[in-house]
């Protein structure tokens, strides 16, 4: 599941409004003058671009294709919270200043449950950033999703064709990919490894042997873990299962599982669940710094890695976007406080399995200013701007110069996501129907960890939730 939230929430709209009212008049006039220097409002075009009568100059000239809609506002709803959402808003700040289009952003830890409620209740945002193709399909079925304009469609030429399929429902393209992330990482402390004489494992067998060696040494638990995430509690456990299924059986069985041609109760999947249990439900191996196996269900995924910095656990399986959770003064790199390595395949015959996730910009309105924002946020120019705002964010947009990735984790992830020899697959639970992938599977896997529920019942309950 491609969750990218953090615990620190954005300031509320009311608090932002209060701060705006405190701006001194001279500062306000200066801001208005700056905006006027870059844009002059006028009517816009029907495809969200063309500039109309609004002429942009200087640093703003590059936004001319999106001009003509000054003074308008579009709303956006997503699961991305501060501090990551702060960087997201920075990525379009210049676009907003130059074009005069304000993007009113709201993040929620209950995004997946709240979006359908808002859409059904008529409180639909102009945009939603949806991390699950299954949820996208549910929204398309509501009849409220608007097909993207021609400019957004044209921008898909800069992505591998498979990404367009992830943003499509029944062969029709609806949602442009915005980001990509590498799920198949293990975070660790190079400092702790070096002090104990441990080496980064290259195979699954080596990883399991290292885990046993760490446990026997007794100074720390080999693994940390946390799957609590508000109404999305359970999603990290789906990643662990997906990594094992892909790394054991490869892409073909993985695809059959996503389509329920291979059920959760199939021997292949229950065998994969036993592999996960031997790994992340091993009482001798988890949950360093927090408690026993059941504590994984009550530890937030954001907090799960903190014991790596204190030496209470030595490894955490989490996605590339977890980088945003480390304290700002954390040194990240091969010789730093924290780094990561590629999770090895369970079956060495599977070539470089890579599970990834992503986010898709979905529109519920077709006003010209909405289309202008849609065209910009699907462009290579925006993706490059987003890379520049902060580390910890990766795009599979081929128009992004890889030299922009100054962070070693980002570069590691970008290389893996674009490796033509890798066995890449999108997050399975995000591809499954929303009732399963972001519903019953989260619930059942949480019960598997929190209550010790059997593999058989866990699998059967998920299968029973599959739409007929």
Image (cartoon, helix red, strand yellow):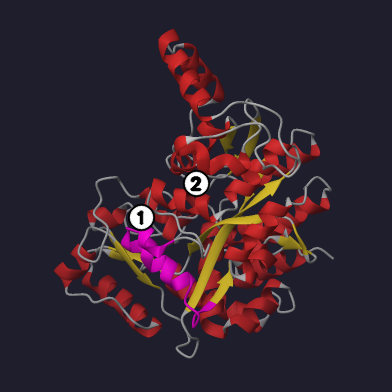
Vertical relation: 187 (above or below) 39: below
Q: Residues within 10 Å of mark 1 (few under 14, many from 20)?
A: many
Q: Tally the marks.
A: 2
Residue name at image x 45 percent, y 75 percent: 278
Q: Nearer the viewer, mark 1 or mark 2?
A: 2
User: In which quarter of the view is residue 466 placed?
Assistant: bottom right
Give percent across and percent down for residue 133: 68, 59
Give percent across and percent down for residue 178: 57, 54
Q: Residues within 10 Å of mark 2 (few under 14, many from 20)?
A: many
Instruction: Say whether residue 403 is magenta.
Output: yes
Q: Residue furthest left?
A: 195
Q: Which residue is mark 2?
A: 5
Give percent across and percent down for residue 379: 57, 53
> What range of the chain is rendered magenta?
401-423
In the picture provided, is 286 more to the left or to the right than 444?
A: left
Taking depth in this image into account, of 322 and 399 the one nearest to the observer is 399
In the picture provided, is 241 more to the left or to the right than 386?
A: right
Instruction: Say whether residue 335 is magenta.
Output: no
Residue name at image x 24 percent, y 77 percent: 199
Vertical relation: 452 (above or below) 258: above
- Which quadrant, please, contains the N terminus? bottom right
In the picture provided, is 466 more to the left or to the right than 319?
A: right
Label 2: state its secondary structure.
Answer: loop
Taking depth in this image into account, of 183 and 220 the one nearest to the observer is 183
Taking depth in this image into account, of 356 and 366 the one nearest to the observer is 366
The image's mark for residue 31 is: none
Residue name at image x 65 percent, y 55 percent: 176
Q: Which residue is mark 1?
A: 305
């Amino acid at each position: 599941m491609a969750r990218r939230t953090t615990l620190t929430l954005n300031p509320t709209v009311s608090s932002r409004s209060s701060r705006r009212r405190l701006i001194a008049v001279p500062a306000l006039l200066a801001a208005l003058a700056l905006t006027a220097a870059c844009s002059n409002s006028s009517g816009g075009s029907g495809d969200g671009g063309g500039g109309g009568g609004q002429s942009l100059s200087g640093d703003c000239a590059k936004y001319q294709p999106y001009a003509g809609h000054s003074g308008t506002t579009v709303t956006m709803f997503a699961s991305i919270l501060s501090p990551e959402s702060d960087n997201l808003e920075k990525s379009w700040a210049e676009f907003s200043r130059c074009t005069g289009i304000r993007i009113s952003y709201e993040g929620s830890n209950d995004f997946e449950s709240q979006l359908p409620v808002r859409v059904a209740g008529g409180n639909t945002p102009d945009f939603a950033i949806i991390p699950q193709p299954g949820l996208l399909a549910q929204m398309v079925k509501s009849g409220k999703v608007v097909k993207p304009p021609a400019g957004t469609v044209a921008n898909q030429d800069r992505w591998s064709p498979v990404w367009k399929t992830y943003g499509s429902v029944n062969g029709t393209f609806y949602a442009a990919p915005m980001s990509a992330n590498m799920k198949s990482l293990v975070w660790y402390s190079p400092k702790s490894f070096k002090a104990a004489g441990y080496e980064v494992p290259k195979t699954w067998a080596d990883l399991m042997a290292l885990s046993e060696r760490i446990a026997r040494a007794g100074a720390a638990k080999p693994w940390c873990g946390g799957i609590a995430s508000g109404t999305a509690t359970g999603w990290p456990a789906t990643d662990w299962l997906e990594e094992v299924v892909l790394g054991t059986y490869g892409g073909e069985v993985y695809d059959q599982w996503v389509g329920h041609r291979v059920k959760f109760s199939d021997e292949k999947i229950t065998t994969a669940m036993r592999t996960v249990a031997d790994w992340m439900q091993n009482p001798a191996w988890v949950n360093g710094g927090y408690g026993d196996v059941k504590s994984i269900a009550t530890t937030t995924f954001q907090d799960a890695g903190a014991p790596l910095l204190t030496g209470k656990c030595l490894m955490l399986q989490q996605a590339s976007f977890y980088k945003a959770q480390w304290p700002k003064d954390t040194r990240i790199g091969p010789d730093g406080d924290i780094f990561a390595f590629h999770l090895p395949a369970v079956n060495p015959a599977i070539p470089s399995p890579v599970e990834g996730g992503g986010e898709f910009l979905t529109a519920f309105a077709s006003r010209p200013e909405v289309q202008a924002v849609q065209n910009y946020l699907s462009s290579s120019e925006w993706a490059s701007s987003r890379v520049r705002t902060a580390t910890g964010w990766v795009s599979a947009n081929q128009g992004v110069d890889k030299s922009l990735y100054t962070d070693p984790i980002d570069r590691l992830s970008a290389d893996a996501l674009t490796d033509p020899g890798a066995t890449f697959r999108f997050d399975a639970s995000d591809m499954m129907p929303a009732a399963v992938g972001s519903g019953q599977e989260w619930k059942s896997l949480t019960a598997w960890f929190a209550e010790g529920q059997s593999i058989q019942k866990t699998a059967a309950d998920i299968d029973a939730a599959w739409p007929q």
